Image (cartoon, helix red, strand yellow):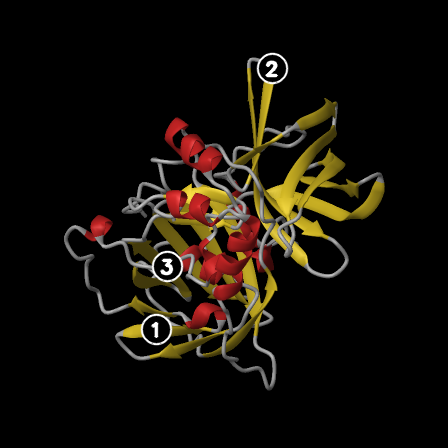
Amino acid sequence: MNSPTGLGESVMLRPRYLLSCILAALCMLAVSTVSAQTNDFAGRWVLALNSGQNTDYAELEILREDNQWQLFIDGGPVNLLSQDENKIAFDLDWTDGLDRLHVTELSGELTGERMNGEMIENGERAGTWSAEPWAAYPEVGADPAPVDFSGIWSSVSRGTHKDTFDLTSAGTKINDAYDRTLDDPHLRCVSGGVIRIEDGPFNYEIIDQGDYLLILYEYFDETRRIWVDGRSFPEDIEYAYLTMGYSIGHWEGSTLVVETRGMKPTIWDAAGMPVSASGVLIERKYLDEADRLHTDYVLNDPANYTRPVYRHAYRVQRPGAGLEEYACDPHTFYRSLQLEGRLEEYWQSSDRF
């Protein structure tokens, strides 16, 4: 399938295939497209991180050229710490739910077409990890077979939350000027846009309205429509500057593929990383065998990033779950700046996000 954004097959392997990929005949057919070979680290991998609570999934890409190695997780560079024969060690910079920065070392070995190892943080074991060859979705280009996503969904995994990415010079300039104590729109109770809202730890509800799916988010009480009636994007959508963007979806088998354009300039998360008005977000939403709702995100924003940015998250339906009113008082933000003598500083920079 030719993607309208030029992303092609840049998608995550469904987690339900991660543990059985080598044995499953369908996945064996897809593995032929993977560049990673037996006893060779180079290639694209589906990375699974197990901290003992939930498993988080990511894309690991390992490039080797002229005996030089480059490693990327979710589109952002990471450091190769060591590599000898079938052993490898690299790090992952990420932020937790309280926006605190962590650096975790992943060390392990390659056996056949699978990597396994341990995660170490601050000298202590933090969990285990594994990686299997990247494979394309089995339903790419398949005839539509819609499924019902209706219901209230609670967050389980929000992905790795990789902290740094491969920015262009323009993106670096914006990110360097970003001050998380002043510029994060969430601090003043302003929605940070579709990427931030989708990433929130709060529940959301999906309602099938026929021509579109309506998503009601507890986070900032946002709403979103994903049109599935075959329409095209409006003209000049890049200049729409919509908080939640304009989303159009279509079914590939039982996978809902959603393209969102027309987003207002904003940031990827609380730590920064800009999203331009020309950025395009591709999502693939699907249920696994345990009826968990997975979403793979790919942000293609060449104005700010030299590589696409990835994230994988999944949710579950919990009995009795609901949507609560989201409470946020911007007074505390402005009042604290006034007490710190920084209110004028904020007014001078408030046009950025």
Amino acid tagged 3: Val
Q: Tell me how far mark 2 sits from mark 3, CA to CA.
A: 38 Å
Instruction: Work out whether 182 lies above or below 71.
Output: below
Does residue 260 appear in the picture of this structure? Answer: yes
**Which quadrant of the figure has residue 202?**
bottom right
Q: Tell me how far mark 1 sits from mark 3, CA to CA.
A: 12 Å
Q: Nearer the viewer, residue 287 or 19?
A: 287
Quick one: SS at disc 3? Answer: strand
Amino acid tagged 2: Asn
Indicate which label's residue lies in the foreground, 2 or 1. 1
Residue where numbered disc 3 is placed: 257
Residue projecting furthest to the bottom: 320
Residue where numbered disc 2 is placed: 67
The crowd level at tag 3 (other Cα within 10 Å; few <14, some 14-19, many 20+) is many
The crowd level at tag 2 (other Cα within 10 Å; few <14, some 14-19, many 20+) is few
Mark closest to the chain's N terminus, 1 or 3: 1
Amino acid tagged 1: Leu
Left or right, residue 348 beside residue 186: left
Does residue 10 appear in the picture of this structure? Answer: no
Q: Residue at x 70, y 36 (%)?
A: 112
Q: Nearer the viewer, residue 186 or 65?
A: 186
Quick one: SS at disc 2? Answer: loop
Mark closest to the chain's N terminus, 2 or 3: 2
Mark closest to the chain's N terminus, 2 or 1: 2
Q: Residue at x 49, y 46 (%)?
A: 310
- Residue 220 position, x and y percent, is 45, 69
Left or right, residue 271 beside residue 256: right
Residue where numbered disc 1 is placed: 213
Left or right, residue 308 beside residue 26: left
Indicate which label's residue lies in the foreground, 1 or 3. 1
Quick one: SS at disc 1? Answer: strand
